[in-house]
Amino acid sequence: EKLPYHPVRDFKMIMQFGSFNMGVIVKSDAPFKSFKDLITFARQNPEKLTYGSAGTNSMQSVIIEQIAKREKVRLTHVPFKSTGDAQGALLGGHILFAAGDFNYPLVESGNARLLLLFREERAAEYPQTPILKDVGYDFPVPTFICVAGPKGLPDEIVKKLEDAFTRAMKEPAFIKGMNDLRLPIVYRSSRDLNAYVAQNYETYGRMLKDLGLKQ
């Protein structure tokens, strides 16, 4: 899709206050107990390991396709309009795993099993679940929740907003709300977030090109 704006140049990042828990889930009665089990199945059954995501070229589908390329296995991607749709297809038995953000009650109620997290650090919410680097992959996972403004926003306004939102992160109600939603609290300053977004935009551009996908 051609956008009427540039995802990096047309925004001024003010600060990051959180992230998403994204990863790989399977049905609780599936035979897969680890992410390695999925890869083993894919190696033994080319193109029969079906997975759903929030769409072709979504971050989660790029990560899975990069893993498949590295492992030299062939998967069947079923793109959906949202990860919620993919989770519904998983529970209905139409796909074997879903990749992306997930409805945490599915996991905590035992209806789905979380095999892998797309995180740069281990999650306090799911301390026993491996992250990408634990299973041998070093792909970046830029899943940030942030405050942003338009390009050209005066530095003094950026600083005032950054300070206010940073103070708000320390409020007990904010911390409780994020914990209730199982959302990781992650802080980046305006300067660090602008650099982080620009760096990952370039990195994912290279990953898309490496997979032969449109940027």
Image (cartoon, rainbow, N blue to C red):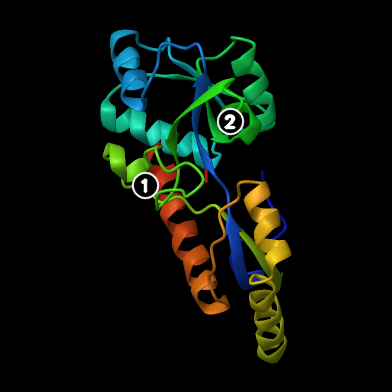
- Residue at screen point 61% across, 65% down: 17
Give me the disc on residue 139: 1
Badge 2 marks a residue whose secondary structure is helix
Q: Is residue 24 visible?
A: yes
45 w.r.t. 143: above or below: above
Residue drawn at x 36%, y 42% as measured from the top left: 132
Q: Nearer the viewer, residue 4 or 97?
A: 97
Residue 32 placement (x, y as % from top left): 40, 16
Q: Is residue 192 above or below residue 2?
A: below
49 w.r.t. 193: above or below: above
**Residue furthest bottom in the image:** 156
Badge count: 2
User: Amino acid type of disc 2?
Assistant: Glu
Q: Nearer the viewer, residue 3 or 79?
A: 79
* Residue pointed to by mark 2: 108
Image quadrant occupied by the N terminus:
top right
Give percent across and percent down for residue 73: 31, 21
Residue 103 visible in this rendered orientation of the protein: no
Badge 2: few (under 14), some or many (20 or more) residues near its Cα, within 10 Å?
few
What is the quadrant of residue 109 in the picture? top right
Residue type of the residue flagged with mark 1:
Phe
| Relative side of 11 to 58, left or right | right
Which quadrant of the structure image shows residue 130? top left
Per the model, the C-alpha gap separating discs 2 and 1 is 27 Å
The mark nearer the N terminus, 2 or 1, is 2
